[in-house]
Image (cartoon, helix red, strand yellow):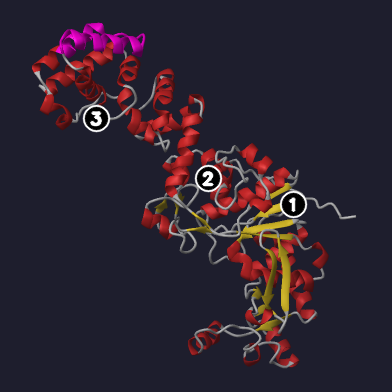
Amino acid sequence: MEKKVRVRVRFAPSPTGGLHLGGVRTALFNYLFAKQNNGTFILRVEDTDQNRFVAGAEEYIVSCLEWCGIVPDESPQAGGPFAPYRQSERKANYKQYADQLLADGYAYYAFDTPEELDAKRKEEPNFLYGQRSRMGMRNSLTLTEQEVNSLLESDAPYVVRIKMPSDEQVSFVDLIRGHVSFDTNLVDDKVLLKADGMPTYHLAVVADDREMEISHVFRGEEWLPSAPIHVLLWRYLGWGDDMPAWVHLPLILKPDGNGKLSKRDGDRLGFPVYAQNWTDPKTGDVTKGFKELGFMPEAFVNLLAMLGWNDGTDQEIFTLEELISKFSLDRISKAGAKFDFEKAKWYNHEWIKNADAGKLLPYVKKSFEMSGIPITNTDRLSAVVNLVKDRCNLLSDFVTQSSYFFVSPTEYDLPAVKPKWTEEKAAFFEAFIPLLTDESAVDLETSFKALATEQQLKSGELMLPFRIMLVGGKFGPGVFDIAVLLGKTETALRIRAAIQQFN
């Protein structure tokens, strides 16, 4: 009888800067799988590389996950039975495993200095520290036991490297890719423990996954070349029976499909690749995020889910609850997914269009305030939101699409009006002012067209000037809807002000 596996998955980012949308998708797929299986979703911060550590990055990662609604069950903030959840706080755990690997002959000390390694790389551009080169280097495989002990006693700097076997195949089953096999002759002897006593990713990830009882490892395809090292470490440390299932997710590709999507691509093509704005603490440079650009978190999560996964139907809009219900590993693609910013905006448009005004109000109000337009009448803003939301791809579009409801236009698209503007049209609008009503856009339109007929004018030629009187340009929802929402007093003021400009 097959043993029932308790699902425990982890998202394990390094706090080195902004959170790439590929990282958020990895967190999302971990979360969906955990929730679908009544499992546990863990945030573990992999901060062992102190040279790349950036202050504030961990808090930023937590904020991004909260914005997306991907809340960990266990984390540095929430705690949990397998604490601590920062690798730097687990430093004392790792040396014992390095010592075990050394004692069992699966690892060795390497005393080569950075200068010696640089010289070797200049000598051999494709230099790899491994089976073919290790016996020509300064390590515990080439030095005598006495020399090694002497170096260790004198506190000479060293690293611990895995001793990759020769002429072997390391094979495992990936739940997306099926049977995967690697030739050990093509894998170098990775560093497991650094000179500062901190583990590298390779040792730390295996030790922590074992100690935290991780059942499934979801991570990006770029980690696939590291998988044979990790598989061997699980076996060498005697934990082969506890090894988690492997799930290597497809890459998120540039829009043209040529290579992995990077921050530079976003800068070059004019769209964000980070979940939220990231401010570099050293330079103060701000990299734009989806949140600040005007994406709803539900739309962002929805579009990420569809990058490399679908449920086998034509459905494209999913709530987080629906994703939890329908998510399945066998529907994840092996091929990379091209990122299409226009499609991303389409998802956001659909979520905005279908959202209740009440849900949108906080976002829209904040956008107006950031634009210097304070909102005092929430009821009016709610009516405006319902009127223009079909026209908005981004939450920030509400300002451009509806600021005229709160601020009278000061400039008009005169070239669109002046060539066909006549005294008769001016007289028409003067006569129309007493007919204005706050009651119904349909009644207002009926009065407008009846007056045009009476004055022997074409109502179609009067609609554009009327729109430009109210909003300043050729945009916005139905012009009679705009007039009713503005109210007859404000509409009259705008008509009179515009007539002076048009004349």
Bounds of the magenta span? 428-456
State which quarter of the image contains the N terminus. Answer: bottom right
The answer to whether one can see residue 406 in this image is no
Q: Which residue is mark 3?
A: 473
The image quarter in which residue 430 lies: top left
Q: Secondary structure at mark 2?
A: helix
Checking the image for residue 301, the label placed there is none
Query: What amino acid type should be assigned to the residue bearing mark 1?
Result: Arg
Contact between labelled residues 3 and 1, with CB atoms less than 8 Å apart: no
Query: What amino acid type should be assigned to the residue bearing mark 3?
Result: Gly
Q: CA distance from mark 3 to mark 2?
A: 33 Å
Q: Is residue 40 above or below residue 450?
A: below
Q: Residue at x 36, y 10 (%)?
A: 440
Contact between labelled residues 2 and 1, with CB atoms less than 8 Å apart: no
Q: Residue at x 13, y 16 (%)?
A: 426
Q: Which residue is mark 2?
A: 303
